[in-house]
Image: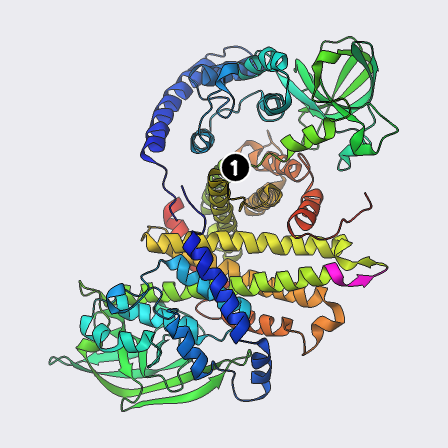
């Protein structure tokens, strides 16, 4: 057993860290000067990462990627999280659409789409969920009929993050309504400027508007924008949904949360003592640190298994479940530590830290829903890992 | 970056599991609850010694295996899964303390006989004060200027103490804490059998002015006796955490198999989410606990600065996990789970006992809090 990275990897980390420090200082300078709207700033940041060679780490060089080793990929995501670097704007492009095109796209699709995903010239959204197809995604009903050289799409998608600013959409549609539900789905790449698309933003429970409803009314999509086979879209969507990750960068984010919580508890006065002096508070924080640390070593187990190809990794569903539970426990504890001030709204007198603990609380609620609910993660663990029988008739 | 079991460690695990399946039965533990305590028969103990388990962490020059912490933990996990009683773990911890102490005369005098199973040694740390661990030790060693001393105090919950040839006793020395090696037949030492809820034999040890000389202190090569004691206690705690992991994964496996076979309402009960989600939660705890255990093992081997907090993380997390997985195993079996014949209560008993040994979850959370306050402060 050995958790050290190789000398070359550490040299790579040092190089990236040095670059990151400088790049972030520059970026903050631009932000302070009020350069452009937030979307534009994010594009600029992503392009900066790309130009320096720290984006598309796993992708082929031919399409702008780095073909970097697994350890270099992990180092980049760890260091980005550690430096609290701004997020890359094109999340869906980089983590869903891009990898799908790399794996299943035609040569023309790879050349057409991949470079612009990396440079953030084209932003992507994901048209999977529907009002009647959430956890039961294969039940989706958005209809696409093939007419000569194009599809005609009619239906509705929902929870589509960033649809209002996206240029392209990775879209799942039903092409064969008579086939079993997993056998009649096709994977399309849809230009969001196509006539017949209407995007309506949805406000989330926390008050933000990150996701949208998208309506399709006789939208034409050229046949060349189909990924893989006709009616073969479900397998393609699954292969990227199940893309295994070590989860190590998520752990660094949790670590940051925990440190802020600890400092909050050490600051908040409760009469004659601080919140951290209370056993209940202290032990909850320690228990969360244990769980965070457990996730970290679980990440090392997964990364090692990926590197060695031993197949001994632990299901990604497990890490996702623990991560979202832990985020929520931390967010709730933040409000508990805040005590009476937990109720004070932002911009009110006496508000604590400008309302960030409440915002964090509502933000955390989404983690156990987006990307597969915790209930579905439980099913995946029970059926996929423990081998228990299916909970519902398929 | 390599955080997987090595081929050799996989082999250790498989051989241990097969050996225990062939040579040990949970029925012995069940009988041990009604009749005198369940112990490992001397022939089996000799075989265990012959396989090199007792000295797996001990130096090669005295016949040990010189393996890392994780390899020792793998044996402890297999023992927990098979419900083998505790002397394996306490012996591994005692001989390793002796091996690493730097007290060459003690090491040379005892260690070969101990790892060959010809003599028995144990650790006596806990006292009847409602606490755990070195910090609360009150047994007192008085040293005269000629290097002779006397040891007075009472130890409880000492495993494998009935007929032990050597007790490594935690005591307050004039300049700090330490372990003192006391022969089982020393004058002033008396042993009273105690019994645990899981049927395992432990003892109370009375030390009434027991004579010793300063060469019996397990000091490190640079004379630090307290560090030897603390490291021994951490080593022992990690082995106990591994035993708790073995219990947890065994109960989870037994219960999962049952949920696949047991049919009610025309379906296997494992197809009901009230059952399957509970088992999924148990698996999450087992995998997080296993990851923490591996992390603690590596930290001890590397003497990493965060080793103590990782030991506490593993012991606390797996104490809670073994109890909760055993309790839900009992519950998910329904009526049959509540019977004497099924092994679940044997696992639950051992889980409860070991969770309350060498510091319970709250004890270790508090120890970790002290460390984290420094690192976050």
| Residue at (45% x, 46% y) in the render | A266
Q: Quadrant of the C terminus of chain A?
A: top right
Indicate whether residue B361 is drawn in magenta.
no
The answer to whether A336 appears left or right of B232 in the picture is right
In the depicted structure, whether residue B5 falls above or below residue B353: above
Residue A128 visible to an observer of this rendering: no
The residue that disc 1 covers is A250
In the depicted structure, whether residue A54 falls above or below residue B7: above
Indicate whether residue B264 is drawn in magenta.
yes
Secondary structure category for the residue under label 1: helix
| Residue at (47% x, 51% y) in the render | A276
State which region is magenta. B260-265
Query: For this rendering, which residue is in front, B260 or B21?
Result: B21
Q: Chain of mark 1?
A: A
Query: In the rendering, at what x and y percent does residue B14 appear?
Result: 50, 61
Q: Residues within 10 Å of mark 1 (few under 14, many from 20)?
A: some
The answer to whether A211 appears left or right of A355 in the picture is right
Query: In the rendering, at what x and y percent does residue B8 appear?
Result: 41, 55
| Residue at (66% x, 26% y) in the render | A208
The answer to whether B339 appears left or right of B79 in the picture is right
Q: Quadrant of residue A242?
A: top right
The answer to whether A296 appears left or right of B170 in the picture is right
| Residue at (46% x, 19% y) in the render | A49
């Amino acid at each position: 057993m050995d958790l050290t990275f190789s000398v070359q990897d550490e040299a790579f980390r040092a190089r990236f860290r040095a670059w990151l420090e400088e790049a972030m200082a520059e970026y903050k300078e631009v932000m302070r000067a009020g350069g452009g709207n937030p979307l534009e700033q994010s594009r600029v940041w992503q392009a900066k990462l790309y130009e320096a060679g720290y984006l598309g780490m796993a992708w082929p060089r031919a399409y702008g990627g780095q073909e970097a080793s697994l350890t270099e990929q992990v180092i980049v995501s760890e260091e980005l999280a550690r430096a609290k670097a701004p997020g890359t704007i094109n999340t869906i492009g980089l983590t869903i659409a891009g990898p799908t095109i790399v794996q299943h796209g035609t040569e023309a699709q790879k050349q057409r789409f991949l470079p612009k995903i990396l440079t953030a010239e084209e932003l992507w959204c994901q048209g999977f969920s529907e009002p009647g197809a959430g956890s039961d995604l294969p039940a989706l009903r958005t209809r696409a009929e093939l007419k000569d050289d194009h599809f005609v799409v009619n239906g509705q998608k929902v929870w589509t993050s960033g649809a209002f600013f996206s240029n392209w959409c990775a879209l799942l549609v039903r092409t064969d309504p008579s086939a079993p539900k997993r056998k009649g789905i096709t994977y399309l790449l849809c230009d969001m400027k196509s006539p017949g698309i209407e995007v309506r933003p949805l406000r989330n429970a926390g008050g933000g508007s990150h996701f949208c409803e998208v309506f399709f009314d006789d939208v034409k999509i050229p046949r060349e924008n189909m990924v893989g086979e006709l009616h073969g879209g479900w397998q393609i969507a699954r292969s990227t949904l199940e893309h295994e990750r070590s989860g190590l960068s998520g752990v660094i984010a949790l670590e940051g949360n925990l440190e802020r919580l600890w400092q909050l508890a050490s600051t908040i006065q409760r009469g004659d003592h601080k919140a951290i002096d209370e056993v209940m508070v202290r032990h909850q924080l320690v228990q969360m640190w244990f769980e965070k640390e457990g996730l970290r070593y679980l990440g090392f187990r997964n990364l090692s298994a990926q590197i060695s190809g031993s197949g001994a990794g632990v299901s990604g569903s497990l890490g996702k479940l623990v991560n979202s539970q832990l985020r929520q426990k931390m967010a709730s504890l933040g409000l508990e530590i805040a005590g009476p001030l937990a109720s004070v709204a932002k911009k009110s007198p006496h508000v604590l830290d400008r309302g960030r603990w409440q915002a964090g609380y509502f933000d955390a609620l989404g983690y156990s829903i987006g990307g597969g609910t915790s209930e579905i993660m439980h099913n995946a663990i029970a059926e996929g890992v423990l081998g228990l029988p299916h909970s519902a008739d398929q | 970056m390599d955080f997987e079991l090595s081929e050799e460690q996989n082999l250790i695990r498989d051989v241990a599991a097969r050996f225990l399946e062939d040579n040990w039965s949970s029925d012995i533990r069940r009988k041990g609850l009604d009749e005198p305590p369940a112990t490992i028969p001397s022939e089996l103990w000799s075989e265990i010694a012959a396989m090199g388990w007792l000295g797996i962490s001990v130096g090669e020059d005295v016949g040990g295996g010189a393996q890392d912490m994780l390899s020792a933990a793998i044996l402890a996990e297999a023992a927990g899964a098979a419900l083998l009683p505790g002397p394996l773990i306490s012996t591994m911890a005692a001989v390793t303390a002796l091996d690493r102490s730097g007290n060459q005369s003690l090491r040379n005098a005892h260690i070969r006989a101990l790892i060959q199973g010809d003599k028995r040694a144990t650790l006596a740390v806990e006292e009847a004060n409602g606490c755990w661990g070195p910090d609360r030790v009150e047994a007192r060693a008085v040293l005269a200027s000629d290097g002779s001393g006397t040891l007075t105090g009472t130890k409880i919950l000492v495993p494998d103490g009935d007929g032990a040839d050597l007790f490594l006793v935690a005591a307050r020395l004039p300049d700090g804490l330490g372990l003192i090696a006391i022969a089982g037949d020393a004058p002033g030492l008396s042993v009273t059998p105690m019994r645990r809820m899981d049927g395992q034999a432990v003892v109370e040890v009375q030390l009434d002015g027991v004579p010793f000389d300063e060469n019996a202190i397990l000091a490190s090569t640079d004379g630090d006796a307290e560090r030897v004691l603390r490291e021994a206690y951490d080593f022992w705690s990690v082995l106990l955490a591994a035993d708790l992991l073995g219990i947890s994964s065994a109960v989870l496996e037994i219960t999962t198999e049952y949920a696949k076979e047991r049919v009610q309402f025309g379906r296997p009960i494992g197809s009901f989410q009230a059952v399957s989600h509970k088992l999924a939660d148990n698996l999450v705890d087992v995998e997080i606990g296993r990851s923490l255990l591996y992390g603690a093992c590596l930290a001890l081997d590397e003497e990493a600065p965060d080793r103590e907090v990782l030991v506490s993380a593993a012991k606390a997390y797996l104490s809670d996990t073994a109890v909760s997985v055993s309790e839900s195993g009992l519950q998910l079996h329904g009526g049959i789970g509540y019977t004497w014949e099924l092994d679940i209560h044997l696992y639950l008993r051992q889980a409860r006992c070991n969770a309350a040994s060498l510091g319970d979850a709250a004890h270790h959370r508090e120890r970790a809090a002290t460390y984290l306050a420094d690192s976050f402060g």
